[in-house]
Amino acid sequence: MSYLPYALAVWIFVVGIYGVVSSRNFVHLVVCLTVTQSSTYVLLLAIGYTNGGTAPIFADVPQTSKAVDPVVQALTLTDVVVSVTVAALLLALAIQVQKRRGTMNPDELRELRG
Amino acid sequence: MDALVPLPVAIPLIAAAALTATGHFLEKRVDDLTAIAASAATLVISLLLVFHAADHRLAYWMGGWKPRHGLAIGVSFTVDPVGAGFAALAAALMTAALVFSWRYFDEVGTLFHVLMLAFLAGMCGFALSGDLFNMFVWFELMGAAAYALTGYRVEETSPLQGAINFAVTNTLGAYCVLIGIALLYGRTGALNLAQIGQTLAGRSPDGLVVVALTLVVCGFLVKGAIVPFHFWLADAHAVAPTPVCVLFSGAMVELGLYGVARVYWTAFAGVPGAHDGGLRDILLGLGVLTAVLGCVMCFLQRHIKRLLAYSTISHAGLMLIGIALLRPDGVAGSALIVIAHGLVKGGLFLCVGILLNALSTVDELRLRGRGRALWPVGVLFTLGALALAAPAPLGLFLGKSLVEGSAAHHSYGWVAPLVTAVTIVSAGAVLRVAGRVFLGLGAAEDPLLSPEPDEEHEVAQDPERSGVLMLLPTAALILAGVGMGLVPGIEHHVKHAAETFTDRQSYVATVLNGANEHTAVDSLSLLTLHASSVAWSLASLVGSVLLALLALYRERLVGRAARDRAYALVGGGLDALRAVHSGVIGDYVAWLTFGVAALGGLLALVLT
């Protein structure tokens, strides 16, 4: 097992955070948030991976054969579902901001200072 | 009795689903009644669980997937009095908020009730779960419902901005938790808290464990509004509908801190070095920073909801100080603060809701003297403010004195004066509002307070509506919060609950081996009024009243030259502090990243 997937997960996470911090557009910001989130998929799948393992379905292979860990895959799936909800909600809010204020730039909304 | 365990989650979820399906056909009042009934039923069952779990923990396995040979495969709800108590607190606040909403909104669709019930289910699930990934799922459910509720009034811009800031920071926090969980799973092969704790126990922590601990703790601290992760809280509270703020301040923020305590005591407490001074000092430092910053920012607000929100941040700091001592009596103190604060702060927010309903603004200066006609609200608001000042033996006193006593035991003697000072400032700010709004005291202008251009339009102005259905839950919450300390034996029971909460060995025995042992506690003590804690409570009560008067009448009390000198001294610092709370999401996320990195570095230094 190489370190590459872990390094990749860290890289995706950091890039996503950078995008969120520097974003000038709400849609861009939400997409960056989902980029950050995809680092968790990579990490989870990397943790469950074994070299030469098959999919964890034992219908037509012997029970003793090597398989990847199904638990992390279930976690990834749950993670996808949960976070899609949040992304959809954020995009809906972004549309409302555009409708009400005619801007997508977070820096132009300054009602909540101090 | 075990069959009751999943009900605090099942009842609100089923009611929410039923309302979604039928809400369009039914009368609004049916929605109201269903939601209130579901929430009240959740409250009753949670309270039953508190009493049932008082002498031994309950482990409930979903679908009957019990552990074999000490190996947990299924998902468990592990109920102890602290967890069930949190569910009960959330359900109590939810019931009050829903009763309050009965007459509150002009037009509120079914979705409001559905979201509120989903929010309640998320909070109860988070409090009861004994499985780390399951906690994450409830955490996200609670979050998603809360984001939607914050932005509920989508026709305005500031709720949108508040909801976006809240959602983005808390979602990033949740990703941190998830990465931490993934790393822990990679190391231990387990998701059950007891199992993780068993695998980690006795091995000295390496880099991976430290990173995992950092990420899980930081993620929960985002929800717990601990500096530097706290920025979202004031924005979300300022714009969310007032009944929703009750839940945010009273239960959700505290659940973030509960998550930290739960994961620490079950998963990490067995790690060598975890009890050492290093970790304690770091958490204590965060708590102190949060408490001080929260109370200073609280004092600078004129938007009353924002002011109460910063006061919540300050109290979250106090709760973290109690947890940071890493001792059962500190946890007990924090738990008592959580109960009293949740009830009182919930009641205060409802008072603000009535003000907003009757007078269409929550600006302290614009409301000056206009609250006189609403004198019952004024009496309740003042009572709540005094309860925050923690006079013995009412309001927050019990919890505060337990935290102080526990800290003194650890030779952190400075905690008592610090907690008292923080209490003086945050309670003083609320008392100042009470004096200005309900008695018309003080000047009409105050250059010290943050400028506040925007107005609230949550509800149309209609004094007729401020009926008994709005006053009743408000009075119930405030009086319960004030009188909580008088319940016979509460201190003893909470101490016992905290002993159970912090006992990792018996947690593992219940969850993995199915042991049904009684969690006996030997150190029985009745309400102890130490002379020192009474003295500190008197100091905080008198101090906060004096500070409120000073804030209102400083132009008469202090000479112009002295005032100018004082402004010159602190003005720059306060302006910088205001500038940091910029309301821009990018800044908040930068602070979050900085906080995670700094906390990770510090933990690596002290643990490895």
Image (cartoon, coloured by chain):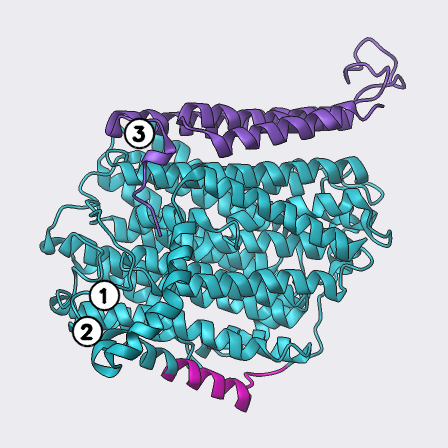
Q: Is residue B451 left or right of residue A79?
A: left
Q: Which mark is residue B233?
A: none
Q: Position of residue B281 (x, y in %)?
A: 67, 65
> Circle 2 sits in a helix, a strand or a loop, which is it?
loop
Mark 2, residue position: B442
Note whether residue B76 is visible. no
- Which chain does the numbered disc 1 sit on? B
Residue B386 belongs to magenta span: no
Q: Which chain is purple?
A: A
Disc 2: CA contacts within 10 A as few (<14), some (14-19) or many (>=20): many
Q: Position of residue B44 (x, y in %)?
A: 45, 56
Mark 1, residue position: B446
Kind of residue indicated by mark 2: Gly
Whether the residues at callouts 2 and 3 have beta carbons within 8 Å, the answer is: no
Magenta segment, which residues?
B525-542
Q: CA distance from mark 2 to mark 3?
A: 38 Å
Q: Which mark is residue A97?
A: 3
Disc 3: CA contacts within 10 A as few (<14), some (14-19) or many (>=20): many
Kind of residue indicated by mark 1: Asp
Kind of residue indicated by mark 3: Val
> Circle 1 sits in a helix, a strand or a loop, which is it?
loop
Q: Position of residue B1 (x, y in %)?
A: 59, 53
Q: Which chain is cyan?
A: B
> Nearest the camera: B19 or B439?
B439
Whether the residues at callouts 2 and 1 have beta carbons within 8 Å, the answer is: yes
Note whether residue B53 is visible. yes
> Circle 3 sits in a helix, a strand or a loop, which is it?
helix
Residue appearing at x 70%, y 57% in the figure: B265
